[in-house]
């Protein structure tokens, strides 16, 4: 699907379902849409999109966003730029993110709404700073905006050419995952005009953003809410949002499940945070979701999927646990702990067989390391003490060099 094709479908009043290239996502979206299709929703909501969202319950959801909500989000981010002294229509919006992500769709919608320029960037360029600097020379007389995730920023800052290119940008919105403090410090030292931001598919992308001048002054967090948004914290510490562009709901088998809201219209996200004079500071996910290479990944469903695949081919696995470990490049990556059945295959053979079962998974979902853990077991109630096993991984890393790592791949 190209932006031009999407625009034509919207012009005819259609709601367009956008899934990523992974076959599993395409099948899941097809199941969510159901045999009745999206037609019944058109009369109420007009043109729009259905996009994948991590939600806040540990499962993949397919979120409806009307075009009017996307356009309202573009208007709000335009007002934010005007407050920074930038004329939105005079800007060039650079976009290396995929169209089936709300963060990749919105740059194009913004450019259409503002009458601004929009240029797609080849994701391969974002892995090679010299390539992007050569392929995308910037006009000093035209403010350039960039939306990316921390993994892409890390890659670009790995070479002087990438840093020099980033230094020419008027605003670099960074979202999709927390910005590592070390990377933020390096960006400040280089004078990069970063604007860490926060949003979700359910909110039609960005709901708050930290102005670059405040970022450069050392302020942390994601800044104050945009003009059309209000934020508050629930008693649990969850970030709650109210605005006129909240999704109507999630699609499930051809029906629309309304977005859960309070009586006052607040939607509760799955993120914990705190609000202060500088705005929102995220503390992490309240659920089990992790951020890996700009993707939201849920370990528990992946564990179940891998166990089922191993059982189907009769691999001798008694216990399996996926844990997240911090990674400077990806943000977080998954490590697999495995307890084989007694008298199982030699560990190298079992490891290779397990790794093959998830070779076709999305890069962010594949375990990066596979660790033999003969004592691995849940509690008597069947619960996993994840803190205990993360500590076990940490102790192991302290005494040995990794010997069972999956092939390194790019997250985007």
Image: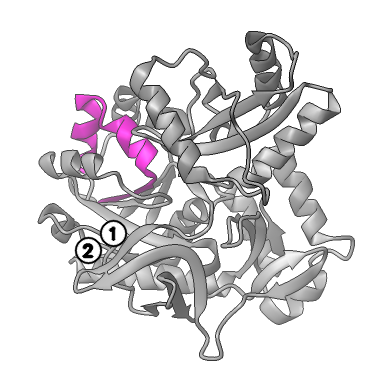
Residue 396 location, quadrant: top left
149 horizontally vs 217: left or right: right
Q: CA distance from mark 2 to mark 1?
A: 8 Å
Q: Residues within 10 Å of mark 2 (few under 14, many from 20)?
A: some
**Residue at x-position 34% and y-position 50%:** 174
Instruction: Report the front residue among 195 and 398.
Output: 398
Residue 226: percent from the left, percent from the top? 33, 73
Residue at the front extreme of this rendering: 380
Find disc 1 in the rendering and name its residue: 90
Residue at label 2?
A: 86
From the viewer's perspective, is the residue at label 2 or at label 1 nearer? 2
* x then y, percent, for residue 383: 62, 49
Q: Sort mark 1 into few (<14), some (14-19) or many (20+) by Cα contacts within 10 Å.
A: some
Q: Secondary structure at mark 1?
A: helix
In percent of width and height, residue 217 lies at 10, 56
Q: Position of residue 198 (x, y in %)?
A: 38, 61
Residue drawn at 26 percent across, 60 percent down = 221
In the image, 281 versus 382, the foreground residue is: 382
Helix, strand or loop under label 2: loop
The residue lying at 18 percent from left, 33 percent from top is 164
Residue 353, magenta (yes or no): no
Quarter of the figure with residue 61: bottom right
Magenta span has 148? yes
Quarter location, residue 54: bottom right
Between residues 252 and 70, which one lies in front from this camera angle?
252
Residue at 59 percent across and 52 percent down: it is 4
Q: Circles 2 and 1: CB distance less than 8 Å? A: yes
Q: Which residues are magenta?
A: 144-168
């Amino acid at each position: 699907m190209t932006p031009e094709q999407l625009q034509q479908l919207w012009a005819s009043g259609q709601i367009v379902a956008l899934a990523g290239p992974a076959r599993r996502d395409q099948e899941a979206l097809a199941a969510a849409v159901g045999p009745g299709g999206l037609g019944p929703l058109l009369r109420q909501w007009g043109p729009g999109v259905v996009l994948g969202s991590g939600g806040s319950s540990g499962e993949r959801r397919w979120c409806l966003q009307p075009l009017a909500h996307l356009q309202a989000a573009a208007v709000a981010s335009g007002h934010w730029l005007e407050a920074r002294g930038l004329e939105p229509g005079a800007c060039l919006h650079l976009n290396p993110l995929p169209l089936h992500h709300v963060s990749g769709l919105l740059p194009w919608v913004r450019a259409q709404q503002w009458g601004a320029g929009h240029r797609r960037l080849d994701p391969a360029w974002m892995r090679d700073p010299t390539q992007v600097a050569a392929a995308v020379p910037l006009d000093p007389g035209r403010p350039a905006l960039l939306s990316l995730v921390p993994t892409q920023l890390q890659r670009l800052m790995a070479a002087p050419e990438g840093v020099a290119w980033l230094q020419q940008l008027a605003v670099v919105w960074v979202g999709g995952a927390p910005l590592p403090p070390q990377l933020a410090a390096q960006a400040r030292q280089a004078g990069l005009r970063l604007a860490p931001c926060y949003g979700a598919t359910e909110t039609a992308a960005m709901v708050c953003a930290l102005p670059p001048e405040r970022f450069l002054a050392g302020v942390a967090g994601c800044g104050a809410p945009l003009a059309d948004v209000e934020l508050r914290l629930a008693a649990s510490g969850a970030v709650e949002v109210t605005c006129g562009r909240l999704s109507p709901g999630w699609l499930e088998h051809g029906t629309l499940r309304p977005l859960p809201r309070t009586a006052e219209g607040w939607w509760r996200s799955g993120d914990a945070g705190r609000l202060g004079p500088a705005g929102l500071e995220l503390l992490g996910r309240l659920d089990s979701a992790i951020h890996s290479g700009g993707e939201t990944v849920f370990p528990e469903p992946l564990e179940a999927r891998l166990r089922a695949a191993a059982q189907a081919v009769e691999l001798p696995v008694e216990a399996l646990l996926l844990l997240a470990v911090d990674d400077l490049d990806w943000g977080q990556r998954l490590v697999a702990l495995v307890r084989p059945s007694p008298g199982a295959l030699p560990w190298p053979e079992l490891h290779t067989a397990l790794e093959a079962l998830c070779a076709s998974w999305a890069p962010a979902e594949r375990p990066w390391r596979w660790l033999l853990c003969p004592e691995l077991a849940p509690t008597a109630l069947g619960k996993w003490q994840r803190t205990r096993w993360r500590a076990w991984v940490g102790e192991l890393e302290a005494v040995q060099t990794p010997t069972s790592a999956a092939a390194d791949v790019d997250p985007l």
